[in-house]
Image (spheres, rainbow, N blue to C red):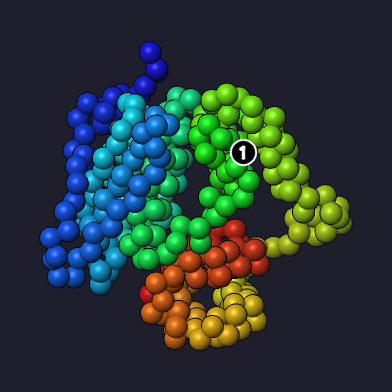
Amino acid sequence: MWDYTDKVLELFYNPKYQGVIEDKGEAGVKVAVGEVGSIACGDALRLHLKVEEDTEKILDARFQTFGCTSAIASSEALVELIKGKTLDEALRVTNKEIANYLGGLPEAKMHCSVMGQEALEAAIYNYRGIPLDVHEDDDEGALVCTCFGISDAKIRRVIVENNLTTAEEVTNYVKAGGGCGSCLATIDDIIASVQKESATPVSTSANHSNERSSVKPLTPVQKIALIQKVLDEEVRPVLIADGGDVELFDVEGDRIKVVLQGACGSCSSSTATLKIAIESRLRDRVSKDLVVEAV
């Protein structure tokens, strides 16, 4: 018997959000669906979102889950976490938050929280007409686990996002290695590669490291100036070349508000532009804690 928390059991026995949201053609409202997993592999989740188009606010959400206690409870927790949020706010919900909301999950069941996060991303990207491979290329790259169809890219992603250090942990999070076990050695190699990559910047120069540790935090004015500099010199030229543009609107702590213009403002891939072209660049150049939002 798994050692489930009271919250997990409560949501499993008394789910409020199981079901389907039908598209009734309501004006100003759009329904989107995201699906992950496979019944053949033991777990599957289909997430339905009802979104107010003007504000991109999630008005309602429902799930259909085939799986265990953890899978159903994670699906219920996901809906409770995202209802009332905008799509951009919902995209920041992680599998860790789902697990924490449940008071924790058994290590061997962490893949259920990952499945919830991925279903949410799939639904939002479907809503915006963005191919899923724009996000993290999880389905690209070499297939590592043939039993569960898990790629090298997906394994790398879950290792980085959850600080995993063993093949057993990877299996708990995405099932890779949980079948025949022939890919466990490859998973160990991927973990070693990720650890080496993350350690490289630190070991390039001891002097450089000392310099960084002694740098004072940026003042608000310095922070805004640096953000504007990165946008002007590194981001805008790329967007302008594709007929788009971006303007800094406001800075509230680590929340950066921008206005997408030109082709970027009307493009269905605006979320990808925010997260890949703008947010990732600002995190590299200014602070890893920055979150970019469109207004």
Q: Secondary structure at mark 1?
A: strand
The spot of residue 157 in percent (x, y) is 57, 46
Q: Position of residue 177 (x, y in %)?
A: 58, 29
Quadrant location of residue 263?
Answer: bottom left
Measured along the vertical axis of the image, is residue 138 above or below residue 164?
A: below
Name the residue that disc number 1 marks. Answer: 144
**Split into 4 quadrants, where in the image is the C terminus?**
bottom left
Residue 138 as seen in the image, left or right of residue 128: right
Q: Residue, x 26% and y 28% (percent of image)? A: 12
- 74 shown above or below 140: above
Q: How many marks?
A: 1
Apparent side of residue 77 relative to residue 161 in the rendered image (left or right): left
Q: Is residue 281 visible?
A: yes
Q: Quadrant of the N terminus?
A: top left
Q: Position of residue 168 (x, y in %)?
A: 59, 26
Kindly identify the residue that appears in the image at 76 percent across and 59 percent down: 212
Task: Judge the density around disc 1: few (<14), some (14-19), many (≥20) Cα neighbours within 10 Å.
Answer: many
Residue 232 in view, yes or no: no
Question: In the image, residue 191 lies at what x, y percent?
Answer: 68, 38
Q: Nearer the viewer, residue 10 or 173?
A: 173
Q: Determine whether, in the image, residue 276 is placed left or right of residue 112.
A: right
Q: Nearer the viewer, residue 106 or 136?
A: 136
Residue positioned 37% across, 50% down in the render: 120
Q: Amino acid at mark 1?
A: Val
Which of the 4 image quarters holds residue 160?
Answer: top right
Q: Residue furthest top?
A: 1
Q: Is residue 208 above or below residue 242?
A: above
Residue displayed at 26% across by 50% down: 48
Looking at the image, residue 8 lies above or below residue 115: above
